[in-house]
Every structure is written in structure tokens, then in C-alpha cells.
Image (cartoon, rainbow, N blue to C red):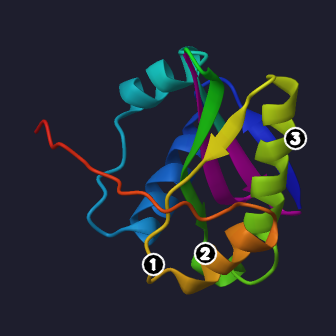
Amino acid sequence: MTIQQITTFNQKTYQAITNLLPQLDDSITPPSKDFLKNMLASGHSHLFVAVSEDNTIVGMLTLVEYDVPTGKKLWIEDVVVDSPQRGKGLGKQLLLHAIQFAQTRNAKTIMLTSRPHRIAANKLYQSIGFIQRETNVYAYNLK
């Protein structure tokens, strides 16, 4: 298993994303091809995928980079491993790769959110050093 960063659009990655994202939340509509192309070209969104020995993408993680007056921060989004591949350490590999990448970007903080019912995911995040913060997260729906 290898972790690779995807920097340019390709059909194989697009198909994998359209398969993986609904496994994270069945209400998710996969992005359009143009949206994914623009995201990859932005330089602020870093897409990492887990690739199996047979060259199949079986997991993904997006790392979003931004600067604020308090420093450079990164936010982890859309961590998902294909259901038949879960429990094999792929999520951990993706997260550790993202942490290593963040260190090369001189980031101050990496943050993520996880729903409380995602027990295995929450245990994983804590096991590799993420600290649960006591805060409220708010969303304002624009559409």
C-alpha cells in the first residue's frame, strides 16, 4: 500500500472519489470534474490517496491549507477508506502522511472534525496524537 498525492486531474482518481465519498456520508454528492480540476489546481487543497498493490485507489484524505494572522493551519477533510479495506491501517497511513506533509509546510496546527458516532475514527485520531478540543462547531448553509 502506498500513499500518493494527486496534483492533476485524471479519470481514475475521479472515479475513485465518486465511489469513496458516498461511503463517508450517503448524502454527499461527488464533485463535478471541473470542480475537482479547480480544487487540485488551487494549491490550497492537497488530495492524498491510498493505492493498493493492484493499483486501485482504496482511500482518500484532503488537506486544506490556509493562512491566518495566528499562523499557517491545515484542516483535514473527507477521510474515507473503502469499506472492504477498513481495519487494515489505511486511515492511519493517510493521516500520518498528512502530518508529515504539514510539517514540510511549516504549519502551526492541523485540525479535523469527526462525528461522535464514528467511534473507530475518533479512537484513531486520538491514538496518533490529535487532541479533542472543547468547542462548538457551527455551520451556516449558503445553499
Q: Does the magenta-highlighted stretch encompass residue 103?
A: no
Q: Which mark is residue 100?
A: 3
Which span of residues is magenta-colored?
48-68
Q: Which mark is residue 116?
A: 1
96 in relation to 69, above or below: below
Q: Amino acid at mark 3?
A: Gln
The residues tagged by marks 1 and 3 sit, at their Cα atoms, a distance apart of 26 Å
- Mark 2 neighbour density, 10 Å: few (under 14) some (14–19) many (20 or more): some
Asked whether residue 55 appears in the rendered view, the answer is no
Mark 3 lies on a secondary structure that is helix
x, y percentage for residue 110? 67, 42
Proximity of marks 1 and 2: CB atoms separated by less than 8 Å: yes
Of 113 and 89, nearer the camera is 113
The image quadrant of residue 74 is: top right
The residues tagged by marks 2 and 3 sit, at their Cα atoms, a distance apart of 20 Å
Mark 1 lies on a secondary structure that is loop
Which residue is drawn at the image coordinates 88% and 54% (left, top)?
Answer: 2
Q: Does the magenta-highlighted stretch encompass residue 51?
A: yes
Q: Which residue is mark 2?
A: 122
Asked whether residue 9 appears in the rendered view, the answer is yes
Decide if residue 39 is on the left or right side of residue 120.
left
95 in relation to 13, above or below: below
